Image: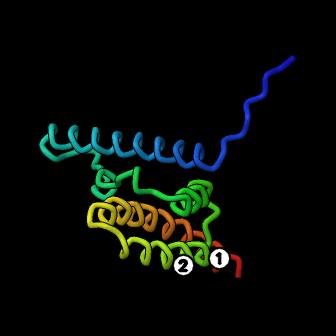
Amino acid sequence: MTHREQPLNPEEKLNAFRGEMRERVADETDKQYAWEGRGRTGEKFDPDMIRVNPDCLTKDDMDIWRKITERKVEIEDWDAYIKKARQEIADTSQDIQEGRGRFTAVAGNMANEIITEKQLEEMDKA
């Protein structure tokens, strides 16, 4: 008899996503220290990523991140996400505004790159 893992429930999925983001923040922080140790030369780090607070991230953040990392994000996805996220962020404390706001900056840069590539591909086909 084979043992099958149970699918994660929504809370477990969110916690796993936050753990993934903690790892990314730690990686970027390591890059920052290495960059500073080399006299600010070589591989740079993402200054927004090191300020992300994974504990502030929501299911919506997780959902848009998955679309981005799977390169499936569309402009309509991003527009709906950022409109809702901005409202939620504005209604929170300063530390959550900073931590989650930095995530939207990182995600936005990545989404913009993907959306632009898709638009250029469509233009090339026309």
Q: Work out how far the residue at label 2 is from the one at label 1, CA to CA, in angstroms.
A: 24 Å
Question: Mark 1 is on which residue type?
Answer: Asp
- In the shown orientation, is residue 70 left or right of residue 94? right
* Crowd around label 2: few <14 · some 14–19 · many ≥20 (10 Å): few
The total number of labels drawn is: 2
Quarter-wise, where is residue 32 in the image?
A: top left
Q: Residue at x 27, y 56 (%)?
A: 47
Q: Position of residue 116 (x, y in %)?
A: 53, 73
Q: Residue at x 49, y 67 (%)?
A: 113
- Quadrant position of the C terminus in the picture: bottom right
Q: Secondary structure at mark 1?
A: helix
Q: Nearer the viewer, residue 69 or 116?
A: 69
* Crowd around label 1: few <14 · some 14–19 · many ≥20 (10 Å): few
Quarter-wise, where is residue 67 in the image?
A: bottom right
- In the shown orientation, is residue 68 left or right of residue 92? right
Q: Which residue is mark 1?
A: 124
Q: Secondary structure at mark 2?
A: helix
- Quadrant position of the N terminus in the picture: top right
Q: How is the image coloured?
A: rainbow
The furthest residue to the right: 1
- In the shown orientation, is residue 35 left or right of residue 115? left
Question: Mark 2 is on which residue type?
Answer: Asp
The furthest residue to the bottom: 126
Marks 2, 1: nearer the viewer: 2
Q: Residue at x 59, y 46 (%)?
A: 13
Q: Position of residue 29 (x, y in %)?
A: 28, 43
Q: Which residue is mark 2?
A: 79
Rendered view: 73 above or below 126: above
Q: Nearer the viewer, residue 2 or 73?
A: 2
Q: Position of residue 68 (x, y in %)?
A: 56, 60
Q: Residue at x 39, y 71 (%)?
A: 89
